Each structure stands twice: as C-alpha cells, then as structure tokens.
Image (tube, coloured by chain):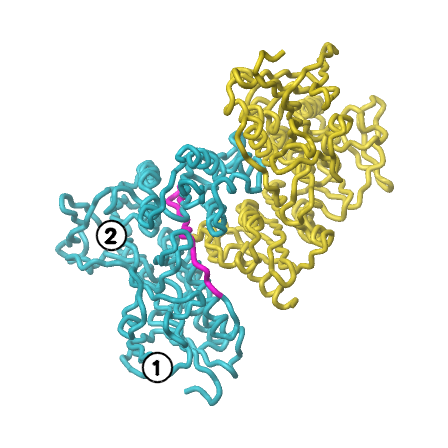
Chain colours: A cyan, B yellow
Amino acid sequence: MASKGRERLVVIGGDAAGMAAASQARRLKGPDELEITAFERGHFTSYSACGIPYWVGGEVDGPDALIARTAEQHRERGIDLRLRTEVTELDVDGCRVRTRQVDTGEEAWTGYDKLVVATGARPVRPPLPGIDAPGVHGVQTLDDGQALLDGLERLEGDHGRRAVVVGAGYIGVEMAEAMLRRGYRVTVLNRGEQPMSTLDPDMGGLVRRAMDGMGIETVAGADVTRILTGEDGGVRAVATDDAEYPADVVVLGMGVAPETALARDAGLPLGGYGGLLTDLSMRVRGQENVWAGGDCVEVLDLVSGRERHLPLGTHANKHGQIIGANVGGGYAVFPGAVGTAVSKVCDLEIARTGLRERDARAVGLQYVTATVESTSRAGYYPGAAPMTVKMLAERRTGRLLGCQIVGREGAAKRVDIAAVALTAGMSVEQVTTLDLGYAPPFSPVWDPVQVAARKAVTKVRDAG
Amino acid sequence: MASKGRERLVVIGGDAAGMAAASQARRLKGPDELEITAFERGHFTSYSACGIPYWVGGEVDGPDALIARTAEQHRERGIDLRLRTEVTELDVDGCRVRTRQVDTGEEAWTGYDKLVVATGARPVRPPLPGIDAPGVHGVQTLDDGQALLDGLERLEGDHGRRAVVVGAGYIGVEMAEAMLRRGYRVTVLNRGEQPMSTLDPDMGGLVRRAMDGMGIETVAGADVTRILTGEDGGVRAVATDDAEYPADVVVLGMGVAPETALARDAGLPLGGYGGLLTDLSMRVRGQENVWAGGDCVEVLDLVSGRERHLPLGTHANKHGQIIGANVGGGYAVFPGAVGTAVSKVCDLEIARTGLRERDARAVGLQYVTATVESTSRAGYYPGAAPMTVKMLAERRTGRLLGCQIVGREGAAKRVDIAAVALTAGMSVEQVTTLDLGYAPPFSPVWDPVQVAARKAVTKVRDAG
C-alpha cells in the first residue's frame, strides 16, 4: 500500500521497456514521491534476448553476461521488482492488477495510480503435433536459452548431430550460425521463397546462396506439418507435406507476436498486428494513466504512415525511456521508426531499413529500385569486401523509401545512413550529396549507399 | 580547333574533379556535340591521392592500383586528355588558355566555350632553410609517393632509421603509421597542442596518447625552423627553436592550400581561404561559362553558414559530377558540406563532422558539449571495442552542431549518422530517437552516437 500523497507506479514486465521506464521514472522522482513496483513472471530481468544466439553458439558467456541489470540492482535503486510474479488480470477501471506467484500460486491485487504495460512478445508456436516434445526449443528468454543448452549437453558425444531450424528470419539465421558453431549439421526450413523475408526476395536470394556456401542447408517453401518423435518421446525429425528432415534438436524461429492477452481482456485498444496502440507519448490510446511500450505495442512507420509491429530491443529501450520521462513528470515522445534491422549469419552481414517493394505497393506508393555492387573500403585497400545495396525511391519525387544491404564486414551498419536519411525525408538525390566519411580503409570515395542512390536518381528520372 | 556547331569544353586539371566533370559531360553529350580537352601537368590522372600513405606503408600496391582510370581509358571515351601539359595563363575575356608542354616547353593557346577549373591544392611547404634537401618529401601526388619510395629504398639496410613527420593532421598521422610499418622510428612534430587539430584538443589528446602507445613520438608546440643537412647534402635532422630531431627522412604533412594562382591572375573571385568561390551549381561567381570544383574551391559549410576549404576526394568527385551535369545540359547542385572526415593511425580510428568548439564560437553559436565512452558492439560481444564520442549541441535549441569520435574498430564510420543528422538540421533529441541498426555484433542497444546525444539532451536542458 502506498503511503499518503505518494504516487504508485506499477510496471507489468521486467525486461527492457518496463525496467527502462521504471529506471527513468526513478531518476526523475525519488521514493518519497513515487513508489515503483514491477512484476516479472520469469527468473530474469533487463536482459539482452538478442544475445541468446551468441550464448548458444558459445561466443558469449551466459546467462549473466546478458543481464544488463540484476533484480538486486533495481531494488537498490528503489524499484520494488518482484520476479516470478505473473499479472493475471488488469482492472483498468479499478486501477489495479491481480498477481499470482508462479511458484506458490498465491494471488493478490495491487492498486496503481499509473500503469506501464510492457508485456513483450511471445514466440509464434503453432499447435503442431509433437511441438512440445523434448528437443524442440524456442529462444525467446534466458530460460529458453538455458533449456536449449542443457538439451545440447545431453547430446554431446553423439556424432553427425543434426539441427533443424524452423524459420529463416533474424532468429532463424542467427540460430543456424549458432548450431553450426556447435558442430551440428544444420537445415533451415523456410516457409517463404527465400530466407530473410524482411528483405525483398532478390536480396534474400543472396543470403540463401551465402548460407549454402557456409554449409547451411536451406529449404524454401517448407511448411512444417508435424514434429516426429522417437521411441523415447524425443524429437526425431521435422515433417513437411512432402519430406522429413532428421533432427536431434529443433529450434523454433518463427517470429513473435505481441503478448497482449492481458491488455485485450482489459479492453485496451489493439491494432492489426495485435499490438497495443499508443499516442506519441506512449500513452495507451484513450487512457489517462496507462502507458505501453516495447514488443507489445505497434509503432508508427514513418515511411508508410502505418502502424507496424517492430519487436526490437532498441525500440523497447527508447519506449521505456520515454514512458519513464512522461510518468516522472518530464516530457518525451517517440516519433516512430523506419524499420531498421541488422543481423549476420557467420560473416555475412544483412541490413534493411524502410519499405520493401511489397510494403510500398501495399500503401500505394510507386517506386523505382536500384541495385549496385560496391565494396566496404577503397577497392585497392586490403580487406575491401563486396556488398550489394538495393534502394527504393518514390517515382517522380525521388524520395528515399528503403534500403537493403547484404555483404561482408563493414556492410550492415551502413544502413544507418539510409535510416537517418529516411527519417529526414530525403530524396535519393539528396543522399548523393551527403558528406559521408571517406578514407581508403573505410569506404570507396562514393560510399556504397551513395552509389546506389546515384543509380536510383537515374532510374527516377528515366521512369518519368 | 572545334568544328562548326560543336561546343568546346576545356578542363584544367586531370584529377578527381576535372575528370569526373569531363566524364559526366561526355555521358550527356557525345563527341558530335561537345569536344572535351583536359590538361594535366603531371604524369597521372584520376588517381587516389588518399591512398598514397597506404602505398608507402606497403599495404597497397602502387601506383597503378591507385589510378581509377588511365589517360588511355579517358581518351577511349572521347576525352582528349593531355598529360604533362600545364596551363600557364587563363584569358577569361578571350575564352582561351595558354598551355606549355612540361617536357618540351612548347606553348600554345586553346580556345573554349566552357571551362572547368580543377587545379586542386598544393601542399603547404614553408620556405625553410634546407626544405628542398634530398630526403624531404611531400606526399601530394603519385610522383611524390614514388620519389619517397625511391628515397626509402636507398636507405634500406641501415639500422635505427628515423623518420620525422612534420604536421599531425590526416596526412601526418597516416604517414606516421606508414613509416612505422616500414620499420622506422617515427617522430611527429606538431605545431598545435595536440595532434589532429581538426578535432577539439580534448579529443586530439586521446589520439596523442594512443600514438604514444604505438611507439610514435609526438611533440606538441613544435615550430620547425630549418632542416639540417649532412655533408652529402641530404637531410640529417629537423630543427625547432629549442631542439633537433635526427632524421634520415622527413615527410611533410603540413596541410594544403587551394592552387588558385592561375584563377587569381585571371581575376576570378577567391574567398578567405584562397579558394575559388562558386554558386550552388559550381559555376564560378560572376562567370557565365566557367565552373570550378575540387580542392581549388571553397564550399559552403551547412552548419556555420560560412565558406570553408575542405580538400577531400569525396567533395571533388561530387563537384565534378555536378559540373559535368550542368555543362552537359543537365541540372545538379552541390548544397554544401558538413565537414565530415575519417582517418586512422594503426588501429585507432578518428572521425569528425560539423563544428568544433572553436568553430561554434567563431560564428557566435553558444553550445553545450557531451562526451561519453561506449563500445562498438554489445559490451558482452567478442571484439567490443571502446570509443569516445563527443557531441556539440546548440544551447537552447539543442540543434546538433558537431560530433567527434576516437576509438578502435567500428568507431569511425559511425560519424555518418551525425553527418546525415547535421545535414537534416536535427536536434540531439531527434538523434536519440533515430531508428539505427542494432544487433549485438554491431552495436550496443543504444548506438554510441545516441549515448552521446542522450547526454547532450540533458546538458542542453540543464544549460537553460
């Protein structure tokens, strides 16, 4: 119970968005003014889920290294963080949440003056026969990562071990690399025509060919129908309509969906992707005292003008920061995002920002595309690595709409140039005149992004 | 002589700006419409002067690898390129230039309808006693690079060889690395208080300490008074007011100045740095049919609103492209630059864009600074390298004014984020909300540039 005159802030979800909100609010208001209680149903808080593939792959120690701030550190800063405590009901009219101790089943109601919903996302896990068999793993939480590593340990010593990764998005390709590093023969089953459907298919094709070269088998158009188990009940193979892929371990990387059952049951507004809808201050639409951020919300796509679901740690941290500022009596807004994402599989770097061709078509934008080959450094400088840059520009206006990059070292982070230019609403012609860093060890005299922009300028002019 | 009805384009200077202009003009107009003659006094054309330190250091083969396009290739595309041909006089009223064959002394006049002045820059080379002694080398042209390498070859076999580099700007620090790679003991004499005066002194201090750690001796406040020679007439030491620095070879890296004697004598308008002044289409101010670009012009600094001399291959290439478009009947403009530059000395990466503190003061801007330490990758990811980011923001408005980065692998090209944001006139608060590429192998969840921006936001607010 709050003491008199002290505001009560309740946070649902103890990961990036929730704890960034709590921390920022605490910076602005001391314990005399604001009581902060955060509920987290898992064992961990404030961790980097993005680091799990590298932990599994053995490049990073875990799970401790992945935890940015422990529960104890939060508590020391005056945040009453309750782990293994699930919020089972949200009573918006009554300004209270019902909690349940995961370990004891004990239930209680907690009242709030202000609420932050940061319930995150849950991995897509279709109800296929066998999907709950031992040896089938998600990689969403540190608990998932630990379970997978424990499973792999039991397989140590077996030869010719096979891993099947279901899904070829970021998590899928990163987990393919991780399993390859652990010595597995890896097959990636992909529903679409190419891996990395966040890219256009032509760019995804580059990723597939590179994965082939790494010894990662990729199967396109593979719709998984069931997980086959052996006599011991453990996983034996993954089946599609027309084939079976032997597996000692199965990793699910089929994407995530907003975890908003609680919010939906409470009558809070959800968008087309099932994420919470907020205003620019991250306040839930139509609510006076409820904020939401992180993987459970939809964000405004600044290029298309539509809401999208962009479950990424960067957004979650920003949302938390902004919510904390507003809850703490400051002022901050989240203007939206442009859909930037970078990833890698072994030494192949993959980046994208803005709209793909299908995204542009979906909102009625006509566009031209320009695809170029360039290098990460001056062509004559040692280590100059090839990269392919694809750019989309609006027909007639030449406005930059999107950029995708596939290449080796030095490729991915170049997408930031396009991300900032997109945010500023620049045309591809403006991109060609940008004053970017040049020296032979760092770039050709025209940065690859500008080489693409130059070609896009010509395409825009020719398209009329 | 031009045939009837065919326009005559004359280009003075056969490097980046001049030949990019010629090439772009040729793309737009065939030989039937436009005759193109380019005069270059040196042996080479279209080469990367920026690559010379890496050629000298042995990382890059030269000089051929540094030549983007040979004279023969230009001629095949219908550009009459005349090497070893110096333009000695420009008669703007008569629309003609006087040329002299460097090897024969033969002189001639050539008329033009349109003229491109791309005379570049010359290295600063003060008239000190001994400066023309054998063993004292500039590194501006491929001929200079070859002369230095020939000189070093004569020294091969000597032990404990010493190189003194005069000047600690980009060329100075890059040449220090090159000489270190060749096994020399290297001393860098620097007039200012820190190396890299294109950075603020606090950031330059980081460079100096890193150079110390590499075994490169740096001497601050060293004003060279003479070059001492031995009995054979060759260089023996470099002298300042109060010390002598033994040297087997001396490399001059004292910056460059616009090469505009020809233009000045012809009455063309020069700015405060001695560079030609142009309009946005790169046409020389007050001239109907004369364009200029590259290291011989001053460019508009988009942050300060002042003209500056920014001798860099990126600008030269852009200028040439834009001049060629305009000369060829198209349309393009160079809006200005923000002063982005990246460099490295061994594994230390150095980057800057926008205004330094002194630049801001010089134009009456009040500012706050924010300096932060961050890493190139997620802190737990292998290879995460430290970097220091300094940001300047305008007082009250929070407009981003400048950014400087000193760090290891992955530091330098991050300055592009700030360069694009500067061009767009973003505030540091807007920088904090940019949607930049994040994954553990590529960045912490807040990119280091955003970590600096967050601190700058606080500083702006606190400064009131």
Residue with the mark numbered 2: A249
Residue A339 drawn in magenta: yes
The disc, 2 or 1, on the residue closer to the chain's N-terminal end is: 1
Question: Amino acid under label 1?
Answer: Arg
Residue in the foreground of this view, choosing between B397 and A128: B397
Classify B1 as above or below A233: above
Q: Is residue A332 left or right of residue A201?
A: right
Residue for point 40% across, 39% down: A390
User: Is B428 displayed left or right of B168 in the figure?
Assistant: left
Q: Is residue B173 visible?
A: no
Q: Marks 2/1: CA distance?
A: 42 Å
Classify residue B269 by image quadrant: top right
In percent of width and height, residue A385 lies at 46, 35
Q: Does residue B202 show up magenta in the picture?
A: no
Chain ID of residue with mark 2: A
Residue B334 horizontal/vertical position (percent): 59, 38
Residue found 68% across the figure and 15% down from its top: B110
Q: Give the structural element (helix, strand or loop) at label 2.
A: strand
State the extent of the magenta-drawn residues as a range: A333-350
Badge 1 is on which residue? Answer: A96
Q: Nearer the viewer, residue A40 or B438?
A: B438
x, y percent for residue B353: 61, 47
Q: Residues within 10 Å of mark 1 (few under 14, many from 20)?
A: some
Q: Position of residue A174 (x, y in %)?
A: 35, 49
Q: Is residue A457 above or below residue A77?
A: above
